[in-house]
Image: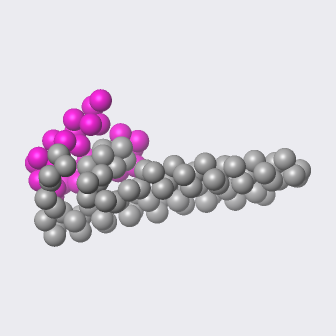
Amino acid sequence: MHDLKWSESEKKLSRRVFEAALQAELADITAKFKAKAAAVTTPDEMWAVREFLAKHQREIEQKYDYRYSQLILALARLVREGRIAEEQLHGLSEEKLSYIRHMVSL
């Protein structure tokens, strides 16, 4: 799997799907942040919002790793989490789709 080659069309497709999932997840986090921040009435609640942001920042940085050596894993995770649908990946080689399906099934 580490020696997979990505065609230009596969790179464009995966980047588009990847970025759309990232932006959607960031929008979800932003909405939750706004609700939490608006409800803050104490310093402890304020620090809890900061912890919420730090936790989600770490998760986003780990999950959205676009290095080609990690991309199959990232895409499989996004499918498993429901952030993208497998149909959005049609255009990738059957080999890549097979790896993704296998990892989603684990």
In the rendered image, the residue lying farthest to the top is 106
Q: Is the image coloured rainbow, by chain, by secondary structure, or in one colour?
A: one colour
The percent coordinates of residue 11 (x first, y second) are 22, 65
Considering the image in quadrants, where does the C terminus appear?
A: top left
Q: Is residue 42 left or right of residue 51?
A: right
The percent coordinates of residue 94 (x first, y second) are 10, 48
Q: Is residue 36 visible?
A: no
Q: Main secondary structure of the magenta part?
A: helix
Q: Which residues are magenta?
A: 80-106
Q: Quadrant of residue 103?
A: top left
Count of numbered badges drawn on the protein? 0
In the rendered image, the residue lying farthest to the right is 42
Residue 81 highlighted magenta (yes or no): yes
* In this view, 42 is above or below 81: below
Residue 93 highlighted magenta (yes or no): yes
Q: Is residue 97 left or right of residue 42?
A: left
Q: Quadrant of residue 13?
A: bottom left
At 22% from the left edge and 39% from the top edge, which residue is drawn? 101
Q: Is residue 34 left or right of residue 82?
A: right
Front residue (pair 38, 2):
2
At 48% from the left edge and 56% from the top edge, which residue is drawn? 61
Front residue (pair 89, 49):
49
At 49% from the left edge and 54% from the top edge, which residue is drawn? 60
At 14% from the left edge and 52% from the top edge, which residue is drawn? 3
* In this view, 10 is above or below 1: below
The percent coordinates of residue 23 (x first, y second) are 46, 63
The percent coordinates of residue 33 (x first, y second) are 67, 56
Front residue (pair 87, 23):
23
Q: Is residue 13 visible?
A: yes
